[in-house]
Structure formats: structure tokens, C-alpha cells
Image: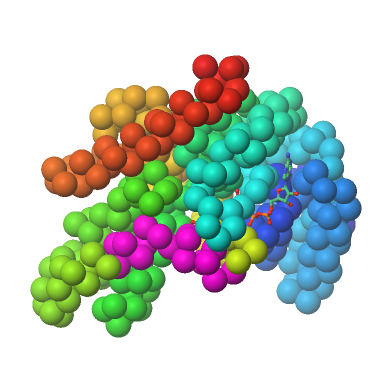
Amino acid sequence: MAQNAGRKKIALIGAGMIGGTLAHLAAKKEMGDIVLFDIAEGMPQGKALDLSQCGPVEGFDASITGTNDYADIAGADVIIVTAGVPRKPGMSRDDLLGINLSVMKAVGEGIKTHAPDAFVICITNPLDAMVWALREFSGLPANKVVGMAGVLDSARFATFLAWEFDCSVRDVNAFVLGGHGDTMVPVLSYSTISGIPVPDLAKIKGVDAGRLDEIVDRTRKGGGEIVGLLKTGSAYYAPATSAIAMAEAYLGDQKRILPCAAYVEGKYGVDGLYVGVPAVIGAGGIEDVVEIELSDEEAANLKVSTDAVEELLEACKGLDSSLA
Ligand SMILES: NC(=O)C1=CN([C@@H]2O[C@H](COP(=O)(O)OP(=O)(O)OC[C@H]3O[C@@H](n4cnc5c(N)ncnc54)[C@H](O)[C@@H]3O)[C@@H](O)[C@H]2O)C=CC1
Ligand SMILES: O=C([O-])CC(=O)C(=O)O
């Protein structure tokens, strides 16, 4: 099916495990016409053809095309970036910094030339540094470039809490702040089950502090747990669905408050960094960063996490002098 000028356009840069899953979700939800871009020749075209053939079975109207040419992303309303390399067992996300930084440079320049008005969601790891670099390379306004991690990390936290409290995940609203690494900050005091703060419900249900610490720790290491099981790459279903929620918030001007790696200037004691914070997503992109009050311990943990992100930015500047 040809692209339809009356529909939104979603460009997916990187057509691997997350990229393909994103395309399927976006098509099923009829979010718009979809362009899958990758440097691998034939692969995005092949996935686009395969996904197009889901249409008659699933009953969606969406054009899905594959390309190796950045010119085809022109006019995109939303761009989701997963181009790069995932980690394998034994690696940290930070080990991907060098290789994925050069990918962000190519992607940033492609976006700058062909789709400078898009809302750009970066997923590539190490997330907080890559979204910063992507913004630098693309030159887009900071409110139009955001990183996906907090929605995923919070979903993991919510899943583990629901299992512990034997309740529906629908009733859990869990919340993770900070960088997307092992220093991320799952915040129990702002996590609720049906409006009841988790620490209060834990007292009622006899869940002790040690058990809650284990859940926090499992959340922090949630990506690595899946890498260890898959062995060939990292998680892709929940990362894709998390980014789709952010894209929908933008396209629908939903004003959702979602934990995202947003550009923070002057809040949380942070100046000029991308890091996970509650952010309002609407038609204006990242419309606001909400600064919540943290306990001394939570604030200290967030500082450890933001310091780790800052170190990665220094490493990026060392690798690419145009960032310094
Ligand atoms: N932010 C988050 O919460 C999460 C981040 N990730 C990260 O997302 C990234 C993608 O993961 P997967 O889709 O599983 O990897 P994948 O390897 O399946 O797909 C990556 C794709 O990027 C393509 N690619 C490489 N260089 C490119 C370039 N210069 N231009 C365009 N495409 C290029 C590859 O050909 C490949 O098809 C990884 O860096 C991974 O660590 C993964 C899960 C969660
Ligand atoms: O762990 C990884 O490498 C992928 C990722 O960021 C996640 O699943 O949270």
C-alpha cells in the first residue's frame, strides 16, 4: 500500500529486534505509515514485506516500507532510534559506548538533514549518553529528543511488585528515576498499588524491608537478567511497547507524565544532562520536567546515578571532539 499523505509517519531507525517489534505494534495500532530504516541491505525491506502481510490477517491499514536511504524518512512525525549494537552476556551497557556513539553520529546527521521536525525517541544504549549525543549530532531542540528507559524500568519494577503482592499489574504504579544503568533509582516511596504507597502496603501484608530491597535490586539488574537468559542480545518486547506509549503520548497530545530520559537543566541539581525524570509528553514534545521531593537517601542515590551519566558524557567527548 502506498503511503497516505493524511496519515502520520513513523520512521524507525534500526530494524533489528526492537525495530521490527516497534513496526508491528505501530501497525496494529494504526499509528501511521511506517518506514523501517537500517544499514543492512534487504533486511528492512524483507521485514516490511513480512509485516505488511500481517495486515490482511490482523486487519490494519498501514503502509510499511523498508529502506537503506535516509531520504525516505523525510516528513516523519515520530522517529524511534534503535540503531546500533545490543550487549551480550558479560558486557555492561557502557561497553557499547564507542561503537554506538559513531552510529548516533550517522543517525543524528540523517535526522538533521531529512526530518528535523520529528519527535525523536532514542532507545540505543548506553541510553542516557546516546540520547545526549543524538541531540548534539542532530541539532534538534532538546524538547524534541528524548530517551526511553524509565517506562521500561518502571514496568519491570511494577511487574515484580505485582508478583510479590499477588495483585494485578494494572493496579501497580511503580516509578524509577535516574540513569538507565545498575545505578538507576527505583523509588518505593512514590510507587503505589491502587493508590496505597508500597511501603504502607508492605507493612499491612508483612513484606519486610529486605524483600523490598531484593525487588529493587532485581529491577536495577532487570536488563542484565534477560541478556543472561537470551544470550544473543537483549530485551525487545517490553522496550518496544514502552517507546510506543511515549510516541502515542506525543501524537495524541496526551500530556502523560512518564519517566523518560529528558534533558534536565536546573532541576534535581542537574545541569545540562539527559537523565531519567518524570516528564510531561504532549504535542510540544517534552513539555515539562516534574521535580518531586526526594528523601536524603533517594537524592544521594540519584546523585550517584547522574554522576555515572556525566562520566559517560566525558567519555563521549573524548571519543568525538565535535562533542567537546
Ligand atoms: N533504552 C532501553 O531501555 C533499551 C535499549 N536497548 C538497546 O537498543 C539497541 C537495539 O537493540 P536491538 O533492536 O535488540 O538490537 P539489534 O541488533 O536487533 O538491532 C539493531 C539494528 O541496528 C542496525 N544498525 C547498526 N548500525 C546502524 C546504523 N549506523 N544505521 C542504522 N542501523 C544500524 C543493525 O543492522 C541492526 O539491525 C541496543 O543498543 C540495545 O542495547 C535494548 C533494550 C532496552
Ligand atoms: O540490558 C540491556 O542491555 C538492554 C536494556 O537496556 C534493557 O533491557 O534494559
Q: Write the residue at 50% across / 50% down.
A: 92
Q: Residue furthest bottom?
A: 166
Q: In the picture, residue 288 is in which quadrant?
A: top left
Q: Is residue 300 above or below residue 114?
A: below
Residue located at (37% from left, 62% from top): 219
Q: Does the magenta-highlighted stretch encompass residue 216?
A: yes
- Magenta-drawn segment: 215-230
Task: Tell which of 309 and 264 is nearer to you.
Answer: 309
Query: Which of the image's four quarters has the N terminus?
Result: bottom right
Q: Is residue 261 above or below residue 140?
A: below
Answer whether residue 144 is visible to the viewer in this image. no
Give yes or no for residue 318 being in the magenta stretch.
Answer: no
| Residue at (63, 39) in percent of width and height | 100
Choose between 57 and 39: the one closer to the eye: 39
- Where residue 244 appears, as percent x and y from the top left, is 57, 55
Q: Residue furthest front?
A: 90
Residue 72 locus on image (x, y percent): 82, 39
Q: Look at 52% across and 17% down and name the residue there.
A: 324
Residue 81 appearing in the image: yes
Q: Is residue 10 left or right of residue 179?
A: right
Q: Main secondary structure of the magenta part?
A: helix
